[in-house]
Each structure stands twice: as C-alpha cells, then as structure tokens.
C-alpha cells in the first residue's frame, strides 16, 4: 500500500474533503461504510475490500465507532483519507463520554485532516439511558452543537425511516431529528430498511416538518439469513414478508441467499434513484462483492 493515492498527494486540502459541498451538484452521492477490524485477518479483508471498491469511486467512506471507542476509528479514517485518498467520515458516539474527553478527541480528528463526522448517541449496555447533561451528552442533538463549537466540521446524523427502537412515536422521532439539523448538522444517513415505502413516508413527513437537509438512504445487502435476522432485531427494521419467505426458502443455499439479497438491493436502489434520493450509503460489512454487483447493475454515472 502506498501513499501515492493520498489526499494531499492528489493536491487536495482537508477542506476539499467536506461532504456537504458535494450535495449542491444535485447528483446522488454513493458512499460505503466500514468498521474497524479486530485483528490482522480482519484488517487484510478490509483493505482488500477497499481496493476492490475503489473503481466505484465513492463520494465518501465512513468508519464506524465500535467497541465503545476502543477500536481505532480515528486512525483508520485518517489512513483511508490521507494515504488511500478516499474522502473520510469518522463516526463519533457520545454516550458514556465526558465533554473534555470529546473535546480532545475532536481536536485530534481536526488535526489529522478529517473534516466529516457522523455524530451519534450510541448505545449503553442493556438500553440504559443517560441523564447527565452537565458533564456528558444524553442525545446526539447535544453532541452536534458541541462539535460545531469546537471546529467547523461537516456533520452527518442518523435517521430512522421506521422509527428508532426507543422512540415514543415517529413524529416525536422526527422532531428530534429536526433538532439535530437545527443544532447544526448538514445531512442525514438512514438506518437500513428494506421497504422503500417506509423511506418515502418518512422523507415526506420530514420535509413537511421543515427538514431540508439531504436524506441519504442506508442500504444493507442481505448476505445471510441468520445475520440479517440478528441485525433487524438490533435496529428495529422490518423485513417485508415476501422477502422473508423467499430468503427462508433459500436458507440452505448461501449463494442463493446472497443472490436474492443482491437482487433485492438492486431493485431498492433503482427505485430510490428514480425517486430523487440524495444518496445511497452501503453498509458493506467490510466486504466488496455485493456492493460491486449492485453498483454494476445500477451503472450510476460517476
Ligand atoms: C447511519 C448510522 C450509523 C451508525 N453508526 C454507529 C456507530 O458507528 N457506532 C455505534 O455504536 N452505533 C452506530 N449507530 C447506531 C446508533 O448509535 C443507535 O441507533 C443509537 O441507539 C441512537 O443513536 P442516534 O445518534 O440516532 O441517537 P439520538 O438521535 O440521540 O436518538 C436516540 C433516541 O432518543 C430519542 N431522542 C433524541 N433526542 C431526544 C431528546 N432531546 N429528548 C428525548 N428523546 C430524544 C430519539 O427519538 C431516539 O429514540 C448508527 C446508526 C445509524 C443509523
């Protein structure tokens, strides 16, 4: 791996990495999400996937913050941007962190040239809730203005077409999304969903409420039945009955499940692109095959 592809080597300044400036062109953005690997084998798989995805020329890639922040999200985002030349966005969860800790972390992000943050609350074990607004953060809407007060980052936040699992109702959830936007964030990436009707209903309601920020659709290609059932349980998304029945009928044949997952994602993305989606954000799970197949079928002009 060389630094020849790096951001500075391409004559780009950190400010050129801002994602918000890209939406103005009116073309849907394409982006990929990766998570920090836990070991050497995972690291090899990740960097191989990144190189296989390079020809798709994503507008940005984002790196999740997992393991309560013990895994190196910042270093990985910096490496992917500064050495490999992809516009990087670092996920940042605030739950369980103090304001001084967060301030120091934000300074490090800024100093490494990262200009995009996906600002999140994160989850405490067992679904506990926080109430300490004095030294810490209860919600992502508290984190957003804190980030803005520290440095002029471009900020993305999470949205939930089917409602966040802890939300009181969809309207209240959208009111809190609006608060995140009003507090200074620039765009929204949604939780994965499989029925576009949920996304369109949510997008209409958001727009009626006065949310004008770009709403990027989160797409997860289904790769295995057991895995998707686990994810859906965690994030509260629904699998449409017809898709579930189809997947379960193919369960003994992993390649057929993969193919059905890819086919569903292609149909979903084609429909979203035909309906003016602001962007498609692929949850890659550090693998390239499904995303490459989907993008080839979509043939998005880059
Ligand atoms: C695109 C995307 C990326 C993600 N990346 C990561 C990651 O890298 N690492 C990770 O650990 N998790 C990640 N998550 C999961 C996320 O951390 C969880 O869904 C978490 O439970 C909520 O985070 P949030 O930022 O959406 O929270 P918030 O926006 O704070 O909302 C959380 C809940 O609180 C409610 N709420 C919000 N504001 C208020 C308020 N002021 N008063 C009362 N209730 C309020 C909301 O309705 C919602 O039910 C991601 C999710 C998405 C969609």
Image: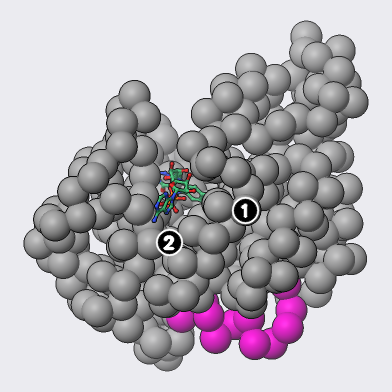
Quarter of the image with the N terminus in it: bottom left
Prevalent SS, magenta region: loop
Q: Is residue 97 left or right of residue 298?
A: left
Q: Is residue 269 left or right of residue 2?
A: right
Q: Is residue 252 above or below residue 264?
A: above
Q: For residue 185, which quarter of the picture?
A: bottom left
Magenta span covers which residues?
18-28
Other residues around mark 1 within 10 Å, as few (<14) / some (14–19) / many (≥20)? some
Q: Is residue 181 above or below residue 52?
A: below
Q: Earlier in the sequence, mark 1 or mark 2?
A: 2
Query: Residue 99: image x %, image y %?
Result: 15, 60
Label drawn at residue 118: 2
Magenta span includes 293: no
Look at the image and tell me whether residue 46 can be seen: yes
Query: Residue 5: image x %, image y %?
Result: 45, 73
Asked if ligand 1 lies within 8 A of label 2, the reply is yes
Q: Is residue 251 above or below residue 160?
A: above
Q: Which residue is mark 1?
A: 171
Q: What kind of element bears circle 1?
A: helix
């Amino acid at each position: 791996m060389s630094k020849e592809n790096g951001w500075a080597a391409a004559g780009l300044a950190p400010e050129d990495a801002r994602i918000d400036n890209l939406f103005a062109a009116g073309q849907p953005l394409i982006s990929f999400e990766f998570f920090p690997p836990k070991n050497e084998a995972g690291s090899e798989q990740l960097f191989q996937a990144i190189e296989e995805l390079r020809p798709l020329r994503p507008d940005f890639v984002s790196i999740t913050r997992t393991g309560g922040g013990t895994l190196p999200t910042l270093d990985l985002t910096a490496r992917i941007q500064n050495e490999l030349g992809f516009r990087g966005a670092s996920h940042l969860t605030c739950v369980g962190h103090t304001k001084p800790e967060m301030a120091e972390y934000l300074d490090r992000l800024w100093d490494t040239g990262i200009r995009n943050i996906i600002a999140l609350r994160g989850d405490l074990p067992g679904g506990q809730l926080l109430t300490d607004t004095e030294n810490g953060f209860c919600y992502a809407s508290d984190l957003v203005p804190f980030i803005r007060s520290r440095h002029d980052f471009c900020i993305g936040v999470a949205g939930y077409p089917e409602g966040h699992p802890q939300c009181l109702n969809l309207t209240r959830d959208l009111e809190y999304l609006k608060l995140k936007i009003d507090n200074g964030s620039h765009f929204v990436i949604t939780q994965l969903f499989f029925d576009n009707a949920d996304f369109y209903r949510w997008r209409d309601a958001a727009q009626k409420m006065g949310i004008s920020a770009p709403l990027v659709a989160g797409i997860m290609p289904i790769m295995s039945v057991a895995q998707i059932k686990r994810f859906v349980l965690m994030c509260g998304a629904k699998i449409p009955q017809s898709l579930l029945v189809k997947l379960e009928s193919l369960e003994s044949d992993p390649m057929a499940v993969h193919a059905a997952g890819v086919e569903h994602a292609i149909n979903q993305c084609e429909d979203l692109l035909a309906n003016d989606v602001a962007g498609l954000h692929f949850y890659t799970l550090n693998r390239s095959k499904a995303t490459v197949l989907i993008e080839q079928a979509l043939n998005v002009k880059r």
